[in-house]
Amino acid sequence: MKNDISAIGNALVDTVFKVEHSLIQELGLEIDQMTLSSAEEHSPIIERLIESGADTVSDCGGSATNSLVAAASFGAKCFHTCKVSDDQDGVRYLESLKEAGVGHKGNMASAKTIPTGKCLILVTPDAKRTMTTALNVSSLMDENDLDLNQIANSKIFYIEGYMVTSEENYKVTLQALNHLQNFPDVKIAFSLSDPGIVMGFKEKFLEMESFGLDYIFGNDDEAMAFVDAENIEEAFMKLQEKSYTSIITMGEKGSAVITSDEIIHTPKANIEPVDTNGAGDMFAGSFMYALLQDNDLKSCAEFANYGASKIVETFGPRLTQESYKEVLNNFKKS
C-alpha cells in the first residue's frame, strides 16, 4: 500500500515549559527564535527550568514528526526517516511515533555514543515559543537510516529544512532526492523551518530547490529570507516566478498560497492564543492531508488554518485524538 506522506527530519523529544520573559533573558536565549545547543549546554538550562517549577509537557517531536503525526491522526498513511539512540528518550520517541500510527525503519544508535535529540521549548504568556535544540544523534543519519523504497512508494516526500544543519543529514537528504529523480510521480514538499537557518544555509536550500520541488511551506519571515525580499509583498512576487506552489503562514494575517497564476489569501481563525509551538507543523501536516483528498488549494488552506488554530489554543504541540477528530469533522461539514 502506498504511503500518503513520507518525511525526513530530526527526531527530538520536545519538552515544553511555561515561563516568563525574564527567565528566557536570564538563560541568555533570544525570544521567539531557535538556538542550536549541545547536550552539555542543555544541562544547566534543564536544571534551571526544573528549579523554576514551570508547568511542562513532553512528547516526541521535531518539525517533520509533528506534521506526520497530524496527518496520520486525520487518517493518512505516513512513514518517517529519522534517528534516535537506544536510551530512555529514544524508546519514548519510537513508542510515541508508533502510537500516532507513523511508520519508521526502527534503527537505533548505541546509547553509549550520543543521546537522542532533545528540544526545550519555552512558552511565554504572549504565546511565543523560544527553542533551544540539542540535535545529538538525530543529526548523524547515514544511508542505513534510509528506506528508499518507502520514500519512493509515497505520494508526497516532505523534507524538514533543519536537515541542512548537519553534513550527515544533508548528504542523506540529497541521496533521497537523487533517488526520487527516477520517481517523478512523487511530489516533493520542503519546509523552510526557520529564518535564521534559511539565511545561514542559503546555498544548501537552493541546491535542494534545484531538484525540482512541488511545494514549499514557511512563514512570512522565512519566505522573505528565502527569496531575499524586503517585505512580504515582494516575496510573493518572487515566489510567483517559481515553478512550485508556495504555502506561507502570516500569523495574524492568516495564510497565502502562491502559484504562478494567483495568490490565495485565507484569514486566520479567531482564537485566544496559548502556545504557538507546533502551529506551522500542524499547518503543513493538515494542508498535505487535505491536498491528498483532492481538495482545491483554498480549501486546503482553510483546513490547515483551522487545524493550526487548535494547536495555538493548546499548551504543547499535540492535540488529543478527540480534538483531531473534531478538526477533521469540521472540515468534512464545510
Image (spheres, rainbow, N blue to C red):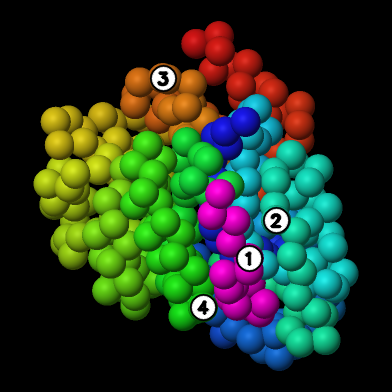
Disc 1 crowd, CA 10 A, few/some/many (<14, 14-19, 20+): some
Q: Amino acid at mark 4?
A: Glu
Query: In the image, what residue occupies the spot 85% across and 73% down?
Result: 87
Disc 2 crowd, CA 10 A, few/some/many (<14, 14-19, 20+): some
Q: Amino acid at mark 1?
A: Asp
Q: Secondary structure at mark 2?
A: loop
The answer for how far apart the CA atoms under marks 4 and 3 are is 37 Å
Query: In the image, what residue occupies the spot 67% across and 89% down?
Result: 41
Disc on res. 105: 2
Q: Which residue is mark 3?
A: 295
Please report whichever mark, 3 or 2, sits nearer to the chain's N-terminal start. 2
The answer for how far apart the CA atoms under marks 2 and 4 are is 18 Å
Locate residue 223, reporting x and y percent: 29, 55
Q: What span is in magenta?
A: 132-149
Disc 3 crowd, CA 10 A, few/some/many (<14, 14-19, 20+): some
Please report whichever mark, 2 or 4, sits nearer to the chain's N-terminal start. 2
Q: Nearer the viewer, mark 3 or mark 2?
A: 2
Whether residue 272 can be seen here: no
